Amino acid sequence: MSAKIKKYPGHPLKSAEVREGKVLTSRWKPKAKYMWSAGVAMSRFLNELKKGKIVGTKCNKCGRIMVPPRVFCEQCFKSTDKWTYVKDTGTVNTYSVSFIAGDASRIKEPIIVAIIDLDGASPGMGIQHKISEINWKEVKFGMKVKAVWRPPEERKGTITDIKYFKPI
Amino acid sequence: MSIEKISDPRQIRHWPGHMETDYIYTHGIAGERFFKEIKENGRITGTRCKHCNLVYVPPRIYCERCFEKLEEWIDVGTRGTIQTFTVAYVDIDGSKLKQPMIYAMIKINGTDGGLVHKIDEANPKDVKIGMQVGAVLKPKEERKGSINDIKHFKPTK
């Protein structure tokens, strides 16, 4: 506001005014399509999920087994050396309980999302996934969990080929 | 030693996605009236600041020099002068156009403003800076309240 202008002219538009064409509008749908390549390491990781296996890579210099796999060891600045399978069991490293869904709507049954350190991989190496078959109040750090896989015919080579992790 | 790489490109995975960034833009108080005048009355309008003696086209509701509220709407006519222009030989995708398109900044005569629009009914070779042009409007029933209600500008004498 200024000395010359005491009040903004006009009024805030209601969505109905726009919907019913009471005001002129310009509309545009940008074609914002993209294709994201998973790369060498993640591609094999996803293809192995389809077979019901979790694969990582090992660096012979630092000895770390990395999951999800990478082709390059970021600590030793060298290529990783071999593919290695890890187990589909692991430990809850950290978790979060969400009472809202992806579209921000409220949900009664919360979604439990956890970082799971997988057995057979180096400490702190693991994947993010959902935890189910447990009351959210009973989830604990350090809890042992196991993957619940989709039946082979339903798998598509995506992270959701594992339905969720359940306590063991 | 390093890990064996994927040699079959079909084994490389990718994700297609689509970002929904649709928008609806409203033209504001001045833009709304400007486009409605074109749509309903076939008139190009501007607003005048009597303090600065400036005519804004497209119209503003405030003078950007003295911040005065502008309430004097005037019909500025449909004639203008080419201030600058460009000739496009490719379309928005980079494909070759059958007919080159002429885009120009047209200063509306008697005002301090102008519009960017197409020049048609002219040979690109004959277009000059300073050339006089006039707006060619769509028939009223085809007008939607957009800048495309003006089909193009064409040379006038």
Image (tube, helix red, strand yellow):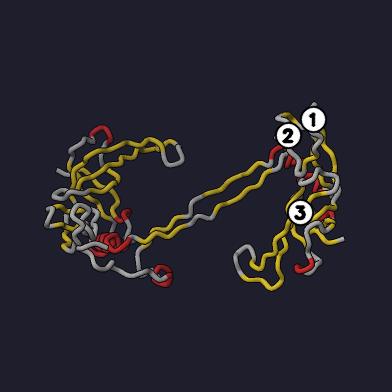
In this image, B132 relative to A63: left or right? Answer: left
Q: Amino acid at mark 3?
A: Asn
The nearer-to-camera label among 2 and 3 is 3
Q: Which amino acid, by three-letter code, is at mark 2?
A: Cys
Q: Earlier in the sequence, mark 1 or mark 2?
A: 1
In terms of secondary structure, where does tag 2 sit? strand
Check disc 3 and report the residue beneath it. A93
Residue A148 in view: no
SS class, disc 1: loop
Q: Are marks 1 and 2 in contact (CB under 8 Å)?
A: yes
- Residue A73, labelled with which disc? 2
Q: Residue furthest top?
A: B1
* Residue placed most toward the observer, A37 or B91: A37
**In the image, is residue B7 above or below residue A15?**
above
Q: Nearer the viewer, residue A96 or A154?
A: A96
Task: Tell me the residue that label 1 is attached to.
Answer: A61
x, y percent for residue A94: 73, 56
Horizontal side of residue A157 vs A32, given as left or right: right
How many marks do you count on the picture? 3
Q: Where on the picture, by quarter, is residue B8?
A: top right
Q: Is residue A80 visible?
A: yes
Q: Quadrant of the C terminus of chain A?
A: bottom right
What is the crowding at mark 1: few (fewer than 14 residues within 10 Å), some, or many (at least 20)?
few
Q: Residues within 10 Å of mark 3 (few under 14, many from 20)?
A: many
